[in-house]
Image: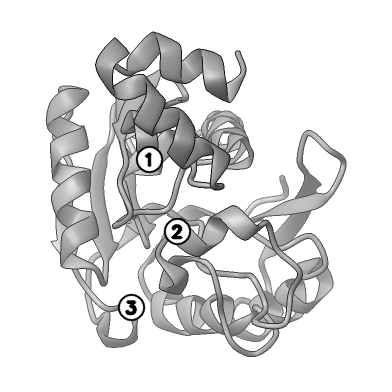
Amino acid sequence: MTDEELIKKYVSKEKQPEALEKLASGYPVQYIIGNVEFYDTLIKVNEDVLIPRFETEYLVDKTIKYLSYLNINNPNILDIGTGSGCIAIALKKHLNCEIDAIDISEKAILIAKENAIINNVNINFIVQDIHKFNSNKKYDLIISNPPYVPFNSNVDEKIKYEPQNAIYAKDNGLYFYDLIMKKIKDNLKDNYLIAFEIGDKEGQDIKNIIKKSLPNSYVLLEKDYNNYDRYIFISNQKI
């Protein structure tokens, strides 16, 4: 379905001319409509949260399959940088699990809580800066789609409407992977899975970061639908 068709489907007739004008100016159709379908869920979005992408649906799908492969049942999960809550909500709808989901943005957490209600799931959403994360809790799965776009990248003009701190990261896009690994290495159960979405040119650098924190872990780099490096999975077991 084209963006114009989506507007005609989801926007009332009297508001369609204004909506089509915004669309023509480059404003994201997802914000115009106000929601996105994401892995069998409906996710409300506005300019306070990143728009969920197809690539992140695939992260969820692969994560569910690897949890099964590793015999990790009824997992305790930590979702770092939850934004709209799309990852946490999709996992909760497909797994018997308990989820803590954190984000630095109070506005994002409010949207995530609304999305949990819309999708009839119970998730522990917390306003939390990963820089200040300090917990004794152990998790079976830690998952994150952190900011990973280098500041000097050529990007789609439309992303200027999205929260910039959810997109860009310093250290050539690697900053949050290093920070997360340092913060969570003591929060893993004996049998664990870590799942990251990554930039398509960052795979080897992130693997090096991981090996500094978890030298005995198994690390798997995987591709997205377009055959770009996009995901890293880490476990104590061979994947």
Residue at 24% x, 68% y is 105
Q: Earlier in the sequence, mark 2 or mark 1?
A: 1
Instruction: Kindly state the secondary structure of the residue where label 1 is placed.
Output: helix
Marks 2/1: CA distance? 9 Å
Check if mark 3's residue and mark 1's residue have beta carbons within 8 Å: no
Q: Earlier in the sequence, mark 3 or mark 2?
A: 3
Q: Nearer the viewer, mark 3 or mark 2?
A: 2
Quadrant for the C terminus in the image: top right
Residue at 26% x, 86% y is 132
> How packed is label 3: few (under 14 Cα within 10 Å), some, or many (20 or more)?
some
Residue placed under numbered mark 3 in the picture: 130
> Tag 3: residue type?
Ile
Residue 11: % across, % down = 32, 18
Q: Is 179 above or below relative to 123? A: below
- 198 or 158, which lies in front? 158
Residue placed under numbered mark 1 in the picture: 31
Marks 3/1: CA distance? 27 Å
Instruction: Kindly state the secondary structure of the residue where label 2 is placed.
Output: helix
Residue placed under numbered mark 2 in the picture: 161
